[in-house]
Image: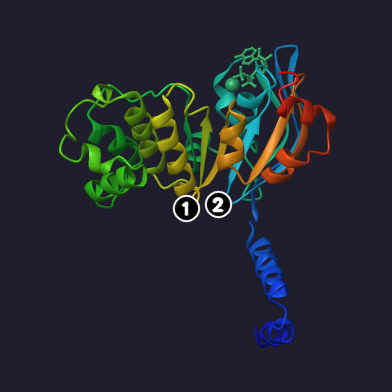
Amino acid sequence: MSDSEAGESVSSPTPGTAVAADDSGDNARAAEPIIKARGINVFYGETQALRNISMEIPEKRVTALIGPSGCGKSTFLRCINRMNDLIPSARVEGELLFENKNVYDEDVDPVALRRKIGMVFQQPNPFPKSIYDNVAYGLQIQGYEGDIDARVEEALRGAALWDEVKDQLNSSGLDLSGGQQQRLCIARAIAPDPDVVLMDEPASALDPVATSQIEDLIADISKEFTVVIVTHNMQQAARISDKTAVFLTGGELVEFGDTNKIFENPSSQKVEDYITGKFG
Ligand SMILES: Nc1ncnc2c1ncn2[C@@H]1O[C@H](COP(=O)(O)OP(=O)(O)OP(=O)(O)O)[C@@H](O)[C@H]1O
Ligand SMILES: [Mg+2]
């Protein structure tokens, strides 16, 4: 530490240098990968949906998956918490490391894995239960021994919904607006305190106000959780993500990197064409 202080005092006469030093400190802080995909291939029956996907997803950051319809974004998202297990024709090859353990190892319990890697879908899908029960349910089935009321409140606050629903916790989750329902689903996903939250187009069914609330919320929860989000909305990806993965037709990952770089100066011509709307 005294070394770096000495270093800083040497460079301090130039204000620019101090800024640069701050920047590099920020980069250094950036993010151990929490998820590493290595050579992932996914088949539905004979049809290959993903080809040799490798990428490293940083912890407590937002990673966006973008690309045209059918390029395999949802398929990749489902690889991460083994939701593809639920599709009989799906077969996954390669390694998907979560905290350096392959989630496809035989000793991994997919139910326990999904507690650590929660998911939010495109259509808000609250259970036909009370607001309270929607959030408490996951805690109850996992035998949570803490104060469930407190945890429900914390999750609803985390999902920026508490103030709107605190006086109606016993009314049905289905009576909320679409945007509120989606925030309820986010509260449900974060209540068990997962490490990662996967979101598959979580705002695409919502109006612009609700969409912007969800975007703010994602920025907020990424301080605590790793977020991997599929979106068709380029501006949204550019606004909210730190890293962007661009998949293109055929199930290939064409480019993966810092969001600014992908949107301002992509390496691949195909990515540039996609981002500027020339196809897709
Ligand atoms: N359950 C399934 N059974 C068979 N094929 C599937 C299944 N789910 C997806 N596929 C196929 O796998 C490929 C990738 O689909 P996926 O849903 O992952 O794409 P996507 O990028 O999420 O598309 P969209 O943007 O439209 O949601 C497509 O060709 C699709 O038809
Ligand atoms: Mg999809």
Q: CA distance from mark 2 to mark 1?
A: 6 Å
Q: How many marks?
A: 2
Q: Residue 269, how many percent across, how many down?
A: 84, 30
Q: Which residue is mark 1?
A: 224
Q: Does any portion of residue 38 appear in the rendered image?
A: no
* Residue placed under numbered mark 2 in the picture: 60
14 or 88, which is in the foreground? 14
- At a point 73% along the width and 74% down the height, the residue shown is 17
Q: Earlier in the sequence, mark 2 or mark 1?
A: 2
Q: Is residue 76 above or below residue 140?
A: above
Does residue 214 appear in this view? yes
> Residue 95: horizontal and vertical position, in percent?
72, 38
Q: Nearer the viewer, residue 276 or 196?
A: 276
Discs 2, 1 touching: Cβ within 8 Å? yes
Q: Is residue 251 left or right of residue 30?
A: right
Residue 158 lies left or right of residue 273; in this view the side is left
Q: Amino acid at mark 2?
A: Lys
Give the class, few, some or many, for how many residues have Cα within 10 Å of label 2's Cα (few <14, many ≥20): many
Q: Nearer the viewer, residue 100 or 262?
A: 262
Compare residues 60 and 231 and report the one nearer the observer.
231
**Image point 49% across, 53% down: which residue?**
223
For badge 1, the amino acid type reads Glu
